[in-house]
Amino acid sequence: MKVRRARSGCSAEEAAPSGRWRGAGRRLSAAGVRCGRATGEAARWISRRRRIAADQFLRGACYGAGTAAVGLLAVWAQTR
């Protein structure tokens, strides 16, 4: 019986199953590696600064809601 070899050199039985596995026999392109690295760094940054990021998000949402309310009041006042 012929045993097919995977790219890593191990036999097909020992190789990782095909599919959405990270090392499924394909390498990422340089752009894919950069994108993955940037995504990982952003995720680590957010996990380290989760509370600060949540506070900033809430602050931005409040500023946005206030700006929208003032804008609607200005439009309402101009139409009257």
Image (tube, rainbow, N blue to C red):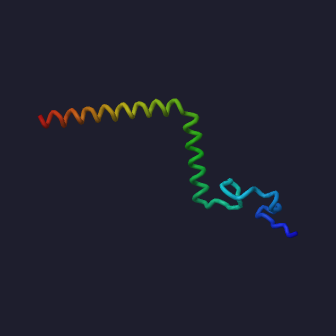
Total numbered labels: 0
Estimate the x, y position of residue 40 in percent, counting from the top left. 60, 46
| 41 vs 62: above or below | below
**Residue that sits furthest to the right in the current view:** 1
**Which quarter of the picture shows residue 65?**
top left
**Residue that sits furthest to the bottom in the current view:** 2
Q: Split into 4 quadrants, where in the image is the N terminus?
A: bottom right
Estimate the x, y position of residue 78 in percent, counting from the top left. 14, 36
Q: Is residue 20 left or right of residue 13?
A: left
Q: Is residue 34 left or right of residue 3?
A: left
Say which of 42 and 72 sits in front. Answer: 72
The residue sitting at 54% across, 33% down in the picture is 49
**Residue that sits furthest to the left in the current view:** 80
The residue sitting at 25% across, 32% down in the picture is 70
Estimate the x, y position of residue 80 in percent, counting from the top left. 11, 34
| 76 vs 28: above or below | above
The residue sitting at 56% across, 47% down in the picture is 39
The residue sitting at 40% across, 31% down in the picture is 59
**Which quarter of the picture shows residue 56?**
top left
**Which quarter of the picture shows residue 73?**
top left
